[in-house]
Image (spheres, rainbow, N blue to C red):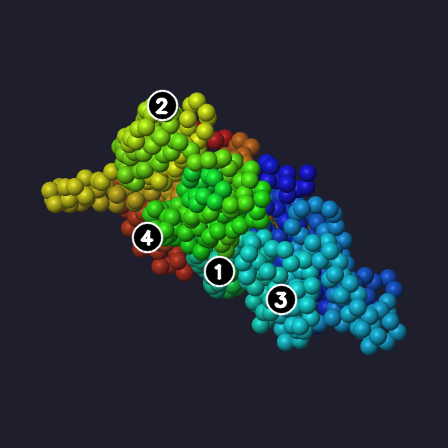
Amino acid sequence: MTPAQQAHAEDPLAPTPVDFVILVDESGSLSAADVAAERAAAALLVLGEVSDKSRAAVVGFGSASRDGQSPVDTVCPLTKADAAGREQLSSCVPRLHRRTDGEGNGTDFPAALTQGLSLLAGDNDTPKIIFLLTDGRLDVSDSPSYGVDAASRNANAQKLLKMKVAQARSDKVQIWPLGFGSNIDKAQLTALAEGGYQSRCADLPSARPTANIAAGSSDVAEVLLSAFAGARCANTTPGQTGETSSSLDLKVTIPPVATDGSIEVVKQDPDAVAVTYYDPRGRKVKLHGEADGSQFELVGQSGPVEALRIRNPYPGTWRVHVEVLDGASTQRITATAIWQGVLRSYILVDPPAPTAGQQVTAHVTLQTRQGVVLTERRQLAGIRVSVNLTGDGFSARKSQLRDDGKGADPRAGDGEFSAHITVPRTANGALSFTGLMTGEGIAGDQRAYATKLAPSAPLLTGAIVLDDHEVHPGGTAHGGIELSNTDAASHRLRLTLAGGSTDTQLTITPQSMTVAAGEQVRVPLRLVFGADATLGSVPGSLTVRDETSGRVVTQAFVTVRVVPVPGSLDRYGKGIGVAAAVLLALLVVLALRWQDRRRIRDTSDIQLILYRDEAEVSRLRAPARAGPEFGFSLRAGPHGTQRLLLDDSAKRHRVRRSKDGGLTVRPPGGERITVPRGQRSALADGLALGFADHRPAKQAAKRAAGAAGTPQSRRGTARDAQQAAPEQRSRGRARTRKGEADNTTLVTRRPYDDDF
């Protein structure tokens, strides 16, 4: 079983894994900014990949101008893109560099493609893709292995390049070239794209291998990410870029149809910024683990690109909050997102067992992996649904389905796509109706509805009709089962619900019924929902089956949506207006008092400072809206120096304010550490921890007042703090920029208080 087949077997609604290699030009024509842009672009792809079963490699290339040199350098071998693998990829991408004259600084496309094809070699069904970044054109004039002079060398390299492109087509490897700068041979890059393997993940223009051209290296990351999304049937959200020396909010949107995605942040100086993520509800999300039905995994936090991979992301606009540490220069930050919607299609055909030449109606609905039925126009925008009919005695036929309320479609915009399809007269035996879907960023299973031709028109026919399409929790949706029995005998039928969710607490009646010989009847149908039924469209289908023969008589989707019960304001808004105003005023007073207490304990203005001996080695700003506590961990940087990183895992160090104006830190090991204001406390292995407090002077005064013992002393302390505030602020700014480290002393640990 291939990796792609195994991944599909384990989770049929997981993103399809891909194997890809990024070939990165390291020729001498590159500037330092060009190399940095190439690194960022490569990191965006390897860290933003939405499947943890995918594999990625990064190869730098130049040329070989003398014996002992290699035109290629595999900086990252083919690595699985799970959490550990993406951290490895984040660490090795920075090895890309500009080649010097002594390293061979030409542009050897054939050698680069040879290495890429070698890394992707293997007989499996996993899609294989090569991305090639270059600022120029093929140039091996300095490579003796191609000939005796510059002209013959480039001519021979062109011939070898054609052979390698033909091999890529034979090996089913797509080639996606990207050129930037003014020295690009677009015709050559187009030939590479068109010469490689042409099979696509979807019948969309964006999924066709194409040569992309960026105006300059600053646009490389965005253009390459867009090409990558097209190559693997994903989509991107236009990113936001900003510059700041303090803090900045960037926004990216993840649509309702997305089931997997990554938010990626490109940082100018990773040591100078801290990033916090907030979902569309304003909730700070975990960096690792599960919360509210979503799974989170952050990688690359210490590198120039970090990526938060999200499974089942909450749809809407996400906020990326960036804090620049004190003393750092103005930072340029970009946030973007790549996502994919992996959907499941459900298909029904009426009549279930047609005769040759008969017209049937096919219906298809779409659901996410969490069973959410897609019914809203914004969820279904850009998605096209079709059915492929195959069987014995005729060639395959494809029909487009619509959700416009016309023709075969009963209701417009309800998420049920329908079409009339005529079974060929030459059909005999088995039939298969397969639902297909296409759309930017959409991938899905290909669910087949298998049936057999009936030798003649059935004597018992029926239809399920729902009269109510909206219901409140605890309510009942009504409809009917219309039956016609032209047989000489009565038939006993059974009604069943398939594919439903326990969250709806749905029961159906009747579950059995009898239709007499020669009778036409409408049997009342009731769908009763529990009082705690989950809001939203209801998944599942209803089936009426003949108990004697086992034949399906009719089927239909449950096109019902559970909506909230109208609130009291909707019913009695005018009658309770005055009472609501009085209650609101009281709540405002209470809220202000509660908010004042909350501000005193808030840690959002804390900046931790890590020292080794007398030297400052790292700083970490608490997240915006951190609340009364935030967490951090220690991690070794590229050169072995320890760094402070935000952490919300169980193994974090927990930080709170103490009553005396300092901090209380609880490591995962057990003993509490007290860090008084203006001092440092021993942490571990020769490290010490201090902090700077950026709380405004008024709030600091309130904090001091809250710590005093009596009301009179609290008022006096507040007045003193406010009178001293201007002088303290002028001195405080200087101390903050110097890390508040000049006149500090070490404080030893002591046991925990009972409350922390």
Confirm whether residue 100 shows in the render.
no
* Amino acid identity at mark 4: Lys
**What is the x, y in percent for residue 21?**
68, 55
Nearer mark to the viewer, of 2 and 3: 2
Mark 3 and mark 1: Cα distance apart in space: 22 Å
Q: Which mark is residue 561?
A: none
Left-right relation of 169 to 281: right
Labels 2 and 3 touching (C-beta < 8 A):
no
Identify the residue at image location x=22%, y=45%: 588
Q: Earlier in the sequence, mark 2 or mark 3?
A: 3
Q: Which residue is mark 1?
A: 239
Q: Which residue is mark 2?
A: 490
Q: Residues within 10 Å of mark 3 (few under 14, many from 20)?
A: many
Identify the residue at image location x=42%, y=49%: 419
Nearer mark to the viewer, of 2 and 4: 2
Q: Earlier in the sequence, mark 2 or mark 1?
A: 1
Identify the residue at image location x=61%, y=46%: 17
**What is the x, y in percent for residue 381?**
42, 54
Left-right relation of 247 to 229: left
Mark 2 and mark 3: Cα distance apart in space: 67 Å
Identify the residue at image location x=44%, y=45%: 359
Q: Earlier in the sequence, mark 2 or mark 4?
A: 2
**Secondary structure state at the residue bearing disc 2:** loop
**Secondary structure state at the residue bearing disc 1:** strand
